[in-house]
Image: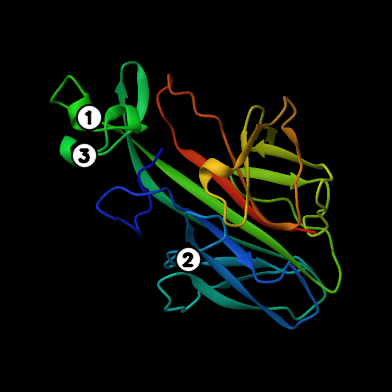
Amino acid sequence: MKKLLISSLVVVSGYSFAHEPYIAPIAYTTEQTQVTVISGYAEEALNSEYALKNAKFEITAPNNTKTTIEPDSKLGSATVFDLKLPEAGTYTVKTSTSYPLKYVQDQKEWKMFFDMPADKAPAKAERDFAIPADLKTKKITPVEITREWTFLTYLSKEKKTPIQASTAPIQVEFLTHPNELKANQAVKIKVSKANQALANANVVIRAKGATDKQGVSLKTAADGSADLVFPKAAEYLIEVSETVDVKQKPSNQFYSIISVSVN
């Protein structure tokens, strides 16, 4: 089923496939003095189609010092910059983006709302959002929220060193170093929010090139843990978010999206 393209960057006749942002280096382990980093919006995981404009990237070096990079990339398909690697160890690259969403209650369920004429939208049974024609009242007062994505990646020069806990709203801790992941070997993560274990969180794993439909979904346990298994050596995106109860009034939504390489 198609989804509305939410990104404020991309509007194709108001309706398209879902695009999600990510960030990833071209090499996750290296002995080089610098590495190219790519970010953007992609329908197929890790295959950027639209650049991430005006982003600021926070770099945490192995010695835990932080710097900020504001790329001047002019590409339309991706945002690209060189990450300097002056010392050995593991670097964390982090950025975020957000956009506003509107929700309305339709038949006791809260759905995203788009002010779209009925003749421009798919049939109601084919979409997961509401339009004015769906609602019985002409006076529509949507609830406005913000959806925020934080996306991260890790790359190691010459050796792997410990990484600091994420400061993202949805925190994802790897019990195995993220640059030491192996195919068909379970990797435990722990998910938290405000430093409290986040039970029943959504975890979606997508190999490079996979669409939303092709992702593998699972839930975290009561202690916020989940075991991830990667079926083959490849690059992957790991998306983690809170479960949304469609019966409850919407509040701001947070996602963490992490790119990793599995050997």
* Residue positioned 47% across, 54% down in the render: 43
In the rendered image, the residue lying farthest to the bottom is: 33
Classify mark 2: residues with Cα within 10 Å, few (<14), some (14-19) or many (20+): some
Question: What residue is shown with label 1?
Answer: 141
Classify mark 3: residues with Cα within 10 Å, few (<14), some (14-19) or many (20+): few
Q: Tag 3, which secondary structure?
A: loop
Q: CA distance from mark 1 to mark 3?
A: 12 Å
* Residue closer to the observer: 151 or 205: 205
* Residue positioned 82% across, 42% down in the render: 186
Q: Amino acid at mark 1?
A: Thr
Question: What residue is shown with label 3?
Answer: 115
* Residue closer to the observer: 216 or 141: 216
The answer to whether 74 is drawn above or below residue 133 in the figure is below
Task: Say whether residue 242 is visible.
Answer: yes
Q: CA distance from mark 3 to mark 2?
A: 28 Å
Quarter of the image that includes the N terminus: top left
Residue 107 coordinates in the image, percent (x, y): 31, 16
Side of 184 where 45 appears, left or right: left
Residue 240 coordinates in the image, percent (x, y): 61, 41
Lower sequence index among marks 1 and 3: 3
Question: What residue is shown with label 2?
Answer: 55
Classify mark 1: residues with Cα within 10 Å, few (<14), some (14-19) or many (20+): few
Q: Which mark is residue 92?
A: none
Q: Amino acid at mark 3?
A: Asp
Quarter of the view holding residue 192: top right
